[in-house]
Image (cartoon, coloured by chain):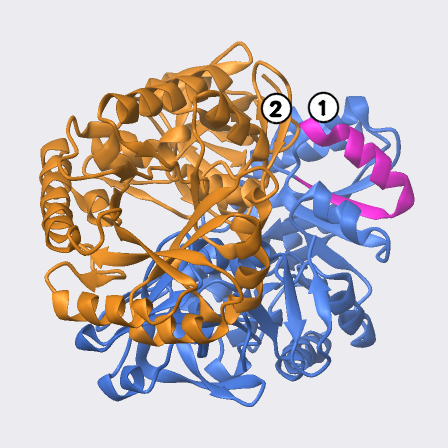
Chain colours: A orange, B blue
């Protein structure tokens, strides 16, 4: 494969398989499947979810909600509501079933005073990640929020939502599962407590590591994973996927080869891959792994061959002597990204291997 | 100041002062000033350099060269020539004085066979950064490259170019200066050796830390710093600038406040700031520092108040108790970026404080 500039490639077959796998899992457990679209950001990839039976989605900004509102009529914005975007919210709310995330009385009061039409809201619950949300045990705050919401006819309580993002810090798949189980237990306890007053309430969970590895979701009604659509080295490192599931790779021209230090320099840097890194006990810091080129696409990662440093446009690859010796200026190497969401965001588009189609992001 | 979404602000006064400072320094030392435009990426900011007397520029890709070719007729692409872009090179070369970077016989032979018109080239020299280039002591390789170039009438040798990027790893300003002096010495030795055969040859150096701190440039003819136009926390941390010189800040809405852990959550994440981090011995990992809001702009960084973690859209700020206690959902905080080049690239545009003008990047 040859690309004159860094080009993000999508293996459609792998992507379809990832979508089918997660849709099947949700169906098998009777869960609503509300995939997060922040990873692929594409209306065209969205169609593949529709073909898999998906009817509702998650996004992470009002901007992304507006982007997808042309084709989707049930959207949860899984980010603490940004009250400065009230105009966007009021523009979107009459057009679709819009769900917001609330964690403070301050935001809820603001919405109550400024909403022009109905919106749903979830209370964001913190099950241990400690980024956002009301502590799962803090029912006094939850009661106060629900009392406030009862006074506003435009605000409709949908349930409790959490993101157990601390699975990303897990040392093993077993630890991911322990975090997932703990999150389910805490959320199930809230459901039990509030279900009598709010019989329709839903419990929504949704990190990709947990949803990929778990084989049960006790007390949950909905899952919202996103990254699984493409996966990446972070997920593989956690044990949440095998490398053959990683559906995107950045094809990078080789611009220099330095056999004496077993290195090559790629046109492909921080503005293409992002500076997200993995820390491998043997190899050190990894900004991407080089996979074997196979026809138009790629195969397995080459052991010991990885991007060890990134500048704005340069990537420095280190690898086994015989692999580096085989490289020539003008070759292209497929690099698996550490964090596919950020690589997609930086590249702004990707090219389908099978179709040759260009997929535009937001 | 209030911005509904993360908004990158440019303090034009600081930027003009940075440009004037570096232009004056180049003039005082009789150096050609060929600023790198990869940081600001804007035609409009380019005009300010023209007003400061600049006639030639540096970029890091053929794409960027094409972008600036509409207004500049002397451009060095400071990146090992990517032979897969020969068509772009052939399109650009007749229109302007285009200089390429070469470090291998392989690339030079390719160019010799495929160029349609004249281009200049610099031999990239490695003075210790070990990213790209011919080792400064490897005159056998340099001789071989020059012999090859003599056989091609389209290739015009301009001189030796280096980027002492290892200044970014320096522990002190003194260490930056030691690296700078060593780079100048190595480049001056090459100049002396080759000057008789190539009397017009130039020595070009150009990292922002070195160019900011150094008060002499022995043996150098040209400087190519780029980041200084905006500076950032990395430069301040190195001692290459004071914080009052940092000319860009990301204004981020506050979406949650967690007084119990002295934290606030911003709408402003890895897709806005980039994952570039600083490692502070006291504070730990820093993805940005919060500055004091002042009118439409910002003042000094608030001690101990910084972005401690980033997700795709979230930034978690930690700060002194009284600072966090004063925050309200809907406030906006100005965040100084760790690496302004990457933040600009991600944001794609920035807004002038004084003019209100939107500056579009590439």
Label 2 resides on the chain identified as: A
In the picture of the structure, the residue carrying the numbered disc 1 is B110
Q: Nearer the viewer, residue A213 or A296?
A: A213
> Label 1 neighbourhood size at 10 Å, few (<14), some (14-19), many (20+)?
some
Q: Nearer the viewer, residue B52 or A280?
A: A280
Q: Say whether residue A321 is visible.
A: no
Image coordinates of residue B354 in percent, x first then y, are: 69, 83
Provide the residue span drawn in magenta: B84-101
Residue at the image position 41 percent from the left and 21 percent from the top: A291
Q: Are marks 2 and 1 on the same chain?
A: no
Q: CA distance from mark 2 to mark 1?
A: 10 Å
Is label 2 in a helix, a strand or a loop? Answer: loop
Q: Is residue B283 above or below residue B103?
A: below
Q: Is residue A207 above or below residue A229?
A: below
The tag on residue A330 is 2
Image coordinates of residue A25 in percent, x first then y, are: 27, 23
Give residue B264's quadrant in the image.
Answer: bottom left
């Amino acid at each position: 494969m040859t690309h004159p500039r860094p080009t993000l490639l999508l293996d459609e077959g792998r992507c379809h398989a990832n979508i089918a796998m997660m849709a099947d899992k949700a169906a098998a457990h009777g869960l609503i499947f509300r995939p997060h679209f922040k990873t692929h950001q594409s209306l065209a990839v969205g169609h593949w979810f529709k073909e898999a039976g998906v009817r509702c989605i998650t996004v992470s900004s009002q901007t992304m909600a507006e982007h997808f509102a042309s084709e989707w009529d049930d959207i949860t914005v899984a980010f603490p509501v940004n009250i400065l975007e009230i105009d966007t919210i009021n523009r979107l709310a009459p057009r679709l079933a819009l769900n917001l995330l609330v964690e403070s009385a301050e935001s809820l009061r603001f919405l109550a005073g400024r909403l022009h039409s109905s919106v749903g809201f979830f209370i964001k619950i913190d099950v241990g990640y400690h980024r956002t949300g009301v502590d799962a045990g803090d029912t006094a705050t939850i009661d106060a929020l629900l009392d406030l919401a009862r006074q506003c006819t435009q605000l409709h309580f949908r349930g409790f939502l959490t993101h157990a993002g601390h699975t990303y810090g897990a040392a093993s798949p077993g630890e991911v599962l322990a975090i997932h189980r703990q999150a389910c237990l805490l959320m199930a306890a809230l459901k039990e407590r509030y279900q009598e007053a709010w019989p329709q309430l839903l419990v929504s969970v949704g990190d990709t590591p947990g949803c990929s590895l778990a084989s049960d979701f006790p007390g949950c009604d909905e899952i919202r994973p996103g990254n699984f659509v493409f996966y990446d080295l972070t997920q593989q490192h956690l044990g949440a996927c095998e490398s053959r599931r990683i559906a995107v790779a950045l094809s990078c021209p080789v611009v220099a080869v330095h056999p004496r230090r077993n290195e090559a320099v790629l046109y492909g840097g921080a503005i293409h891959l992002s500076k997200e890194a993995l820390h491998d006990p043997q190899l050190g810091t990894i900004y991407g792994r080089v996979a074997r080129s196979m026809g138009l696409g790629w195969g397995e990662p080459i052991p010991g061959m990885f991007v060890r440093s990134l500048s704005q446009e340069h990537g420095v690859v280190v690898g086994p002597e015989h692999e580096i010796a085989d490289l020539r200026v003008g070759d292209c190497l497929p690099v698996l990204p550490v964090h596919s969401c950020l690589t997609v965001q930086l590249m702004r588009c990707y090219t389908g291997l099978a179709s040759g189609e260009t997929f535009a992001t937001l």
